[in-house]
Image: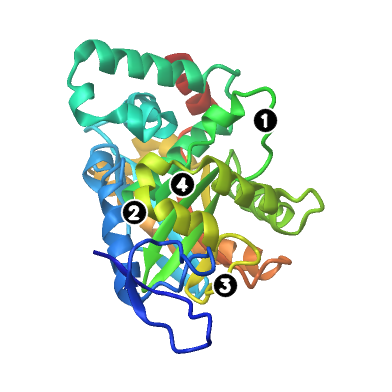
């Protein structure tokens, strides 16, 4: 039985009482203890739709760089055969992962998914939903962002693709909304994805988008927070749905353990991947991993400079970098396979 601190109408020290999450005295979410936040963290781990083991066959991951206390830089590289980069296999994995990205939890019941006819119908429905509106080039980036965040235990709060396909629901905000528990803090991640030929351009555009999202006059951030309250997957989050819906409200109390993070995926062309014959018979995987690692400090420094030179330098950032042979070709192939 979960215990929470209840408000006291007479000003006495709050006592511990058993559920519910909503305080019966004030109708608000009481302060969560460290133990309860840890329980929430364990609950989120069970809600993951993508695991590290799922992506290891398609992507190499590398140690995180932290050029600023508020900036995490993560690095991913497509895996290879003996003589070829496996971008086509990565595309197949992404297409198969669309169902995890767009489908409500109640429809992914493990027992029902054992039925071949039912699971086939769910997969068709997911792909139809993803391409219902001609996919923008950025939307494969949004899918990659989702997969990387989920594999890290940063869990999707709202499935935005069904909202995007609703012509009465124009969305121009974050590319995703995810939640994480880290070091006793509840972190709400607003997603942004950019795939450009030029790394510097992708970094610059991502900072521009996040700045507009945070400081723009269109109320995009407020709109995203309202989406959480209205469209949070209650089947998925259960008793924690009210906690998330309440804690993001601007007038909510007890937000000392709540933080917002800008999670960014940056895909870009890397010329080294187009010059594989220059590796002098070295193992392809070892060659690319070595060359990529040599550039991590430089990439992290570029991101650091972009953050420090922006109007949002005091915000928190979680950035994933991934090089491609050609981002435009990759997006076109994904669209064709979808």
Q: Residue at x 24, y 64 (%)?
A: 1
Distance CA(mark 3)–CA(mark 2):
28 Å
Marks 3/1: CA distance? 30 Å
Task: Give the image location of residue 161, x and y in percent.
Answer: 53, 30
The answer to whether residue 169 is above or below residue 15 is above
Contact? badges 3 and 1 (CB < 8 Å): no
Q: Report if the CB atoms under discs 3 and 2 are less than 8 Å apart.
A: no
Q: Position of residue 311 (x, y in %)?
A: 73, 67
Q: Which residue is mark 4?
A: 157
What residue lies at 25% left-to-right and 39% top-to-bottom?
54
Mark 3 or 1, closer to the camera: 3
Compute the Cα span from label 2 to label 1: 30 Å
Quarter of the rendering containing residue 121: top left
Q: Secondary structure at mark 2?
A: loop
Do the CB atoms of the residues marked 4 and 3 lie less than 8 Å apart? no
| Label 4–label 2 contact, CB within 8 A | no
User: Could you say which is closer to the camera, residue 199 or residue 73?
Assistant: 73
Callout 1 secondary element: loop
Q: Residue at x 57, y 60 (%)?
A: 248
Compare marks 2 and 1 and give the one earlier in the sequence: 2
Q: Residues within 10 Å of mark 3 (few under 14, many from 20)?
A: some
**Distance of label 4 from label 2 (alpha carbons):** 15 Å
Residue 84 visible here: no
């Amino acid at each position: 039985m979960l215990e929470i601190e209840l408000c006291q109408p007479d000003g006495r020290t709050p006592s511990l009482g058993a559920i519910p999450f909503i305080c019966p005295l004030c109708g608000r979410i009481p302060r969560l203890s460290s133990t309860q936040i840890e329980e929430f963290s364990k609950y989120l781990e069970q809600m993951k739709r993508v695991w590290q083991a799922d992506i290891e066959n398609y992507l190499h991951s590398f140690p995180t760089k932290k050029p600023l206390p508020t900036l995490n830089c993560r690095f991913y590289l497509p895996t290879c055969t003996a003589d070829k980069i496996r971008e086509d296999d990565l595309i197949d994995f992404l297409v198969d992962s669309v169902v995890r990205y767009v489908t409500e939890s109640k429809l992914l019941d493990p027992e029902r998914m054992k039925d071949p006819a039912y699971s086939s119908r769910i997969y068709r429905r997911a792909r139809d939903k993803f391409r219902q509106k001609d996919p923008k080039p950025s939307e494969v980036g949004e899918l990659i962002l989702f997969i990387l965040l989920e594999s890290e235990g940063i869990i999707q709060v709202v499935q935005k693709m069904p909202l995007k396909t609703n012509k009465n629901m124009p969305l121009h905000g974050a590319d995703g909304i995810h939640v994480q528990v880290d070091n006793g803090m509840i972190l709400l991640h607003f997603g942004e994805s950019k795939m450009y030929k030029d790394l510097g351009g992708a970094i610059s555009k991502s900072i521009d988008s996040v700045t507009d999202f945070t400081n723009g006059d269109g109320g995009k951030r407020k709109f995203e927070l309202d989406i959480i309250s209205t469209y949070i997957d209650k089947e998925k989050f259960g008793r924690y749905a009210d906690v998330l819906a309440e804690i993001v409200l601007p007038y909510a109390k007890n937000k000392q353990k709540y933080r917002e993070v800008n999670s960014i995926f940056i895909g870009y062309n890397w010329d080294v991947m187009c010059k594989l014959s220059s590796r002098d018979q070295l193992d392809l995987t070892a060659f690319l991993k070595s060359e990529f690692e040599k550039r991590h400090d430089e990439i992290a420094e570029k991101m650091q400079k972009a953050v420090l030179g922006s109007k949002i330098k005091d915000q928190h950032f979680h950035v994933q970098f991934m090089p491609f042979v050609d981002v435009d070709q990759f997006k076109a192939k994904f669209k064709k396979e979808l």
